Image: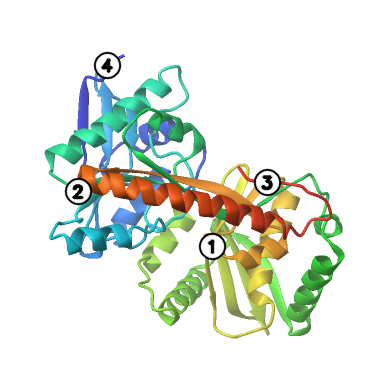
Amino acid sequence: MAPTEIRMHSGVGEIDAAAWDALVGSDHPFVSHAFLAGLEAQGCIQPALGWQPCPLGLYEDGRLVAAAPLYFKGNSHGEFVFDWAWASAYARNGLDYYPKLLCAVPYTPVSGPRLLVGNDAEAGLRRRFLLAAIEERLESFGLSSAHLNFVDEAGANAFSGTRWLPRFDWQFHWTNRGWPDFDAFLAALKPKKRKNIRQERAQVAAAGVRCEIRHGDEIEDSEWRVLHHLYLSTFEAHGNHPALTEAFFHHLGRSMPRQVVAVLCRRAGRIIAAALCLRSADTLYGRYWGADEQVAGLHFEACYYQGIDYCIRHGLQRFEPGAQGEHKIARGFLPVRTRSFHRLVDARFSTAVDDALRREGQALEAYRDDLLDHSPYRQTSQDSA
């Protein structure tokens, strides 16, 4: 198998949606054409923010057979795999780290397919072609580096025997063990953890807050405006740039109506807080949280407990509530490995970063062992991936 043509497009939006989604090989929401093209069309990614789309497409006889969501990056914002120290080292040596090439989903620390090849017998070979095409672009543009962030396990196999540097970290995920309801999940926890969760949920109820679940096609325009307002206020309160536009929120509701899952928290009829999630056939992904009022326990209720309950009721196998947060362990989430791969052209820096990543990896393995010593479950249950 040999591709007849490799194209670097100016955006996912100029690629046929059905052809792109067929290569994803699943209903993973964040690498879908609707999500990625929506970011472009609704003003969420642009060169002024450090994102210039340049997705790759591999074509045979004019048919798209492989693709990768690729970007020229002018900074490291919105990536969640932190390479600020590498950029600083380049600057101290009078070298330019930016622009760089990044294969990822903007603003989204969720593992999934990055080298999109479908599920046929040529999948492994086509991943290698995509990787080679990225390396060729890296060289032809004279860039410092290329990066693939939050790569799923199948994609990670494509890096075996290459010069790409592997890196990993931990996120905290919940796994469904077949509990029939939320109370059965609680019964699997140690008594103290179970008691604390019940107390947190009771605080929310006592404050007169009621949570309701809405899918994208069940959210009214006025509610989308509130959701976006809460998203803006939370990002601004933490000094972060809120890149997602209100138009993008509406776009999600229209284009992915049953994959959008929102938790609306009302008191006296008014939405005072909300959590916005997306889902696939087997996984719920927590993304954005915001609140106009501070209510004890409400963040945990909206962002964790409502999601766990949703997964149990709908038969979803996993709940990935977002990056970071050791406090999630006490609420039933355990460490799961995330992967990224990095190609630095300068051999000196590549060697130094490789050494640093090996030491970082040793520390992270010890960190995981310590985390599992604090598992909330009565017996050892989920292991990390």
Sequence-wise first label, 4 or 1 = 4
At label 4, counting other C-alpha atoms closer than 10 Å, the crowd grade (few under 14, some 14-19, many 20 or more) is: few
Mark-to-mark CA distance, 1 and 3: 22 Å
Sequence-wise first label, 1 or 3 = 3
State if disc 1 and disc 2 touch (CB < 8 Å): no
Snapshot colouring: rainbow
Mark-to-mark CA distance, 4 and 1: 41 Å
- In the image shown, does 78 or 257 lie closer to the viewer? 78
Residue type at mark 3: give it.
Answer: Leu
List the residue tagged with mark 2: 144
Residue 333 figure quarter: bottom right
Provide residue 276's location: percent of width, then percent of height: 54, 63
Between circles 4 and 1, the one closer to the viewer is 1
Look at the numbered disc 2 and give the secondary structure of its residue.
loop
Residue type at mark 2: give it.
Answer: Ser
State if disc 1 and disc 4 touch (CB < 8 Å): no
Provide residue 206's location: percent of width, then percent of height: 78, 83
Residue type at mark 4: give it.
Answer: Ala
Q: Is residue 367 above or below residue 224?
A: above
Residue 11 visible in this rendered orientation of the protein: no
Sequence-wise first label, 4 or 2 = 4
Mark-to-mark CA distance, 2 and 3: 41 Å
* Rendered image: mark on residue 2: 4
List the residue tagged with mark 3: 316
Mark-to-mark CA distance, 4 and 3: 38 Å
Look at the numbered disc 4 and give the secondary structure of its residue.
loop
List the residue tagged with mark 1: 324
